[in-house]
Amino acid sequence: MKNVVIHKVITFVFTEAQLRGYWNEKKQKIPFESLTNEQLMALAEDMLANSSHSQLEQHILDHGWRVKEEIEGQVLAEDDSREHVHVELIDTTKQGSPSTKLFIDRLSQIECSQCGFSFYVRNVNADTTHLKCPSCLQLLKN
């Protein structure tokens, strides 16, 4: 079974069966079995982009019926080319480590000393001396 895992703060899991169903809905002439690893990952991203909020709920890890076993196995391919998303193709029938990567490492976590609210800034080297807390609107203290 080849499942695609998309990490964006929330981890989405697209099972092979779901991807096959989506592919068949699109009435493609190329057989699903002939898709490359990269094409499977692109298909999952297309499915993610074209799903409603209620449809997306079925893909969220640890939400509903998506379980950690669906992201455990051998990583066949991955795409780490964008800063806001990480995509992996995992073969769950082969031995491998669980996919536990949460790619927030490109962000800086900032916590307000006034109210304790935490938020993230994309620019790791950002000057935070002029930022205000989005929750309490107080100037952040370094």
Image: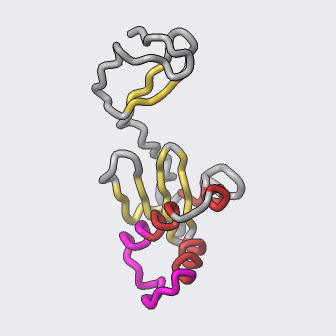
- Residue visible at 52% across and 67% down? 47
- Let me know if residue 39 is in the magenta part: yes
Residue 125 on the magenta span: no
Q: Is residue 76 left or right of residue 98?
A: left
Q: How many marks?
A: 0
Residue 90 spot, x, y in % from top left: 47, 63
* Residue furthest front in the image: 137
Which residue is farthest bottom? 29
Say which quarter of the image contains residue 131: top left
- Residue 11's spot in the image, x, y percent? 54, 50
Q: Residue 74 appears in which quarter of the rendering?
A: bottom left
Segment tinted magenta in the rendering: 25-42
Rendered residue at 61%/53% (across/down): 60
Question: Vertically, is 116 above or below 39?
Answer: above
Q: Is residue 34 above or below residue 2?
A: below
Residue 23 spot, x, y in % from top left: 52, 79
Q: Nearer the viewer, residue 124 or 17?
A: 124
Looking at the image, residue 106 sits to the left or right of residue 95; the answer is left
- What residue appears at the point 55 percent right and 83 percent down from the top-left corner? 24
Q: Residue at x 28, y 26 (%)?
A: 125
Q: Taking 51 as reference, is 25 above or below it?
A: below
Say whether residue 34 is left or right of residue 71: left
Q: Quadrant of residue 58?
A: bottom right
Above or below, comparing residue 38 to residue 60 in the picture: below
Q: Quadrant of the C terminus?
A: top left
